[in-house]
Image (cartoon, rainbow, N blue to C red):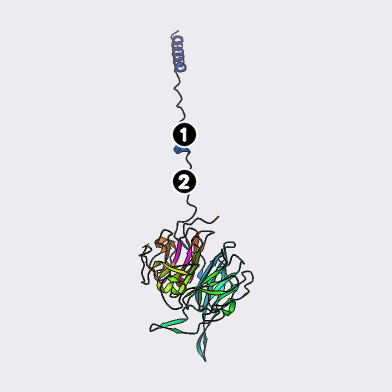
Amino acid sequence: MRRLLATLAIASFALLLTGAATSAPMPAATPAPTPTAASTATPAPTPAGPPAGTVTAVVDPGLFTHGRNVLHGIARDPKTGNIYVGVSNLLAHWNPITGMSSSNDDSLRVISPSGNVTRLTSFPYPNGILINPRDGMIYVATGAIRCNEQVGGYTVSRHCPGTNGLVVVDPATGNHHDYVGAGPGRTDAVGTNARFTAVAEVAFDPDNGNMYVTDNENHLIRQIAPDATVTTLAGVGTRSSADGVGAAAGFSGPRGIAYCAKEKSLYVADRDNNEIRKVTLDGTVSTVAGTTSVGYVDGPVASARFDHPQGVACDAAGDIFVADTDNNTIRVISASGTVSTLAGAKAMGTVNGVGSEARFANPSDLWFDPSDGSLYIIDEGANNIRKVTTGVAPAS
């Protein structure tokens, strides 16, 4: 009887607990938070590529033929990605009877996007290179740069071999012929009746089809019309740093030249004057940045300094890129008038990196490719080709 009463008591107590549990009110559900502007905002885009001033090597320099290679001139075809480079290759020969001798094995080379190097064709002393968008042909400036010497303040002429003009090359076959010029001299004329002395670089004006070249040893800027008529645009013909119009202006060993569409003007790396010059299409010459004094100074164009700049290019915004050769740097002259260093430092080297971490060894020619917003540079002292990002968005 006691056991039965205990069992009934336990059952009643359990029932009481169950009733209490089921009768207890459920806590109210926590409402879902209302989305805020922060939770629905589009996340910031990830940068699409490396930062401006990133320097990389384009090709293994060991792929160039052995000898004393000197690279001159560079252009990149945005359609194929091929890079064209001029190579002056001095070969040494030993003969037990006559002793040492040398010969030139100069050529135009092609670097494929995969980095393969092939010889397209050969001719003496290739320099600046232009892919003409009107006919798709390659125009190569030719001549032995610095074939004249300065002795005691006077110019002493030496033999200046090569075409000393422009050679036109078919990129498909390598077939080539002289376009303008046929030996050293200084003559305005048509085609091969014209004379130049060591043409350094070539630029193209898409509006009128004219090409413009730096006639290095004559210290002139020459114009080449579509019918191959050669005229002198600016320069007195002797070393000078004078601003002015036409023959009233002067240059000293002009090297790089670029046509800038924004201002419809030419920009020239006036090497031996340590200046960047502007040449309008009527022949008016003015100094954009630098002075005849050597230096390495960033800042406003009036106080900036260069050391024998050789290459120049520009983008659609009007920024000017300079290969500041003896400062081992790539500089930028902004459209607002400020000079800064994009990559490299005064110390010479061959280091890839970003900005001042990178090193060059006398960068000379350069090419701006709007299709990828990058500079392609002849790093002459390193016998190599380098690529530098600029921060410019690729053209659509």
Please tell me in which quadrant of the rendered image residue 290 appears. Answer: bottom left
Question: As rendered, which of 295 and 48 lies closer to the eye?
Answer: 295
Residue 65 visible in the picture: no
* Tag 2 secondary structure: loop
Identify the residue under disc 1: 35
**Residue 242 shows which numbered tag?**
none
Type of amino acid at the residue the image marks with label 2: Ala
Q: CA distance from mark 2 to mark 1?
A: 19 Å
Residue 313 belongs to magenta span: yes
* Tag 1 secondary structure: loop
Looking at the image, is 346 positioned above or below residue 42?
below
Question: As rendered, which of 206 and 331 lies closer to the eye?
Answer: 206
Q: At which x and y percent is residue 176?
A: 61, 75
Residue 9 belongs to magenta span: no
Please tell me in which quadrant of the rendered image residue 77 appears. Answer: bottom right
From which residue to which does the magenta span run?
A: 306-322
Type of amino acid at the residue the image marks with label 1: Pro
Identify the residue under disc 2: 44
